[in-house]
Amino acid sequence: MFATRKREIDCGLLAKSLIFQWPMLFLQYYLWIAPHLLLGWTLVASFRRGMHRRLPIFFAYAAFETFQFLTLLALSLLSPFPRDIYNWTLVLETGISSCLMLAVIYELANTLLLTQSSRAELLRPLLRWTLVVLMFVAAVSSAALSGATVRRVTNIFQVLDFSSSLVEVGMLVTLFLFSRTLHISWRNRATGVALGFGISACINLATTALRSGLGKSAFIAVDITQMAAFHVCVLVWLVYLYLPNRALAFAGSGLGKSDIQFWDQELQRITGR
Amino acid sequence: MIIPTIFVVLAFLGLLLILYIAKGHHSTAGNLDQLASQLRSVDVDAFRNLIDHREQDYLRERLPANEFRGIQRERMLAAVEYVRAAASNAAILIRLAEAARQNSDPAVAQAADKLLDNAIRLRLYAFRVVPRLYFGMLMPGVSLAPIDLADAYDTITRQVVMLGCLQYPTRGMSSAL
């Protein structure tokens, strides 16, 4: 009698906890699956628009992210769940993904800013030194932040996640500041790629730092926030993919009559000295 | 929690900066008329005079030290204003040249390309010159004449007028070319 009563209570509690957990579970799965479906859409749409030729490394990054998602999803569906294989796969793929993301940032710099020799002269060493400084800061702060857990794989993942986020934020902010300082305009799609990465990298940096500070209790909240940031990032890519290319807006425009008069006067004053 | 907090703050500042700059990219897109209205005249001769080291030596010899320092400070402040105006004009020319690069005529596109390159050079140069001029204010005895900036402004002025000639051959451009 008591055992039956206890089972009823247990079942009731389980049902109650499931009711409370269900929205969170749905949110977690939604934020894991939906951005990758949208990423698949982005891949197809960008292939149709020939972006794989203009930004091949970005295309490879998006393809790898999709592959990573499919691998992890397949592993998570296995029974019993192979926790260690899952974790090490996650670490390995995060490492590859971070390298690809850095390569995409260089690709953005190349396609957007390095076409002119004068920009290349300044930007190449600027990016090189920014990367060196960021690597150093990442190494020092990773050591300072080390909220070492008992699991080696978790520690490696945290260091990798934090360091790559820091480097990405630093490089992207440098690129944005460079373009702003020189008033160089970016093409729409490349701006979209940079903006998407920028949003995602900044949120990742903030959350990985918080995860190190708050410890295990913050893991789920951090995961959800990072997945939401990636969702926003993919949405930004998609929106920019469908926006008309801004380069066309300039077409046909040029020096106006007032501009020509102004510069003509400037030249006459210079030569009239 | 101090180090994580620092990174959280830095990350949000980075995010705000990226969003602000990306928004700026959109708001200025294609708005060439508005950009052109911001052009400021730069008297290159006056600028050359301000940064001429012979002029500086002459003033140093003729004036008491205190008075010379005051005047030199005024001269360098004026030079900074000229540099800022030149850099601002260069920024506008970068946009105008980018627009002209889309032109179907290869001669116009090539002229626009050269103008773009030199306008960027001028802007980069201006960023390096301003701190030197401020340093010149603090150390009036040190010669920091950034004469290249005036030459660079000369060059882009010729190039923009040349571009105008190529784009609108019938308008009757400067005889100064």
Image (cartoon, rainbow, N blue to C red):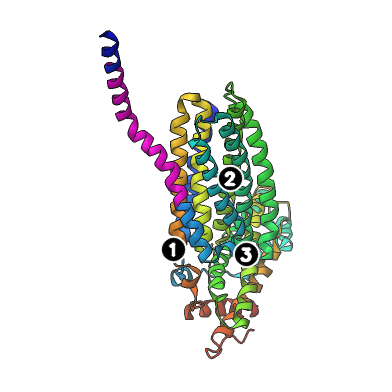
Q: Is residue A93 visible to the viewer in this orientation of the structure?
A: yes
Viewer-nearest of labels 3 and 2? 2
Name the residue carrying label 3: B120
- The structure residue drawn at horizontal position 74% and vertical position 63%, both measured from the top left corner, is B54
Give the extent of the magenta segment. A9-37
Separation of residues labelled 1 and 3 (CA atoms) = 30 Å
Name the residue carrying label 1: A242
In-image side of A37 versus A107 (left or right)? left
Q: Secondary structure at mark 2?
A: helix
Taking depth in this image into account, of A267 and A189 the one nearest to the observer is A189
- The structure residue drawn at horizontal position 65% and vertical position 46%, both measured from the top left corner, is A130
Name the residue carrying label 2: A168
Spot occupied by residue A252 in the image (x, y as percentages of width and height)? 49, 79
Q: Residues within 10 Å of mark 3 (few under 14, many from 20)?
A: many
Q: Secondary structure at mark 1?
A: helix
Q: Give above or below for A43 relative to A215.
A: below
Magenta segment's dominant SS is helix
Q: Give above or below for A241 relative to A76.
A: below
- Answer with the quarter of the image where residue A169 lies: top right
Q: Secondary structure at mark 3?
A: helix
- The structure residue drawn at horizontal position 59% and vertical position 33%, both measured from the top left corner, is A85
Separation of residues labelled 1 and 2 (CA atoms) = 25 Å
Residue kind at label 1, given as amino acid type = Tyr
Spot occupied by residue B8 in the image (x, y as percentages of width and height)? 50, 35
Q: Earlier in the sequence, mark 1 or mark 2?
A: 2
Residue furthest out toward the bottom: B170
- The structure residue drawn at horizontal position 46% and vertical position 56%, both measured from the top left corner, is A41
Residue kind at label 2, given as amino acid type = Glu
**Chain name for mark 1:** A
Query: Given contact means CB atoms under 8 Å apart, are the residues at marks 1 and 3 in contact?
Result: no
In-image side of B143 versus B83 (left or right)? right
Q: Residues within 10 Å of mark 1 (few under 14, many from 20)?
A: some
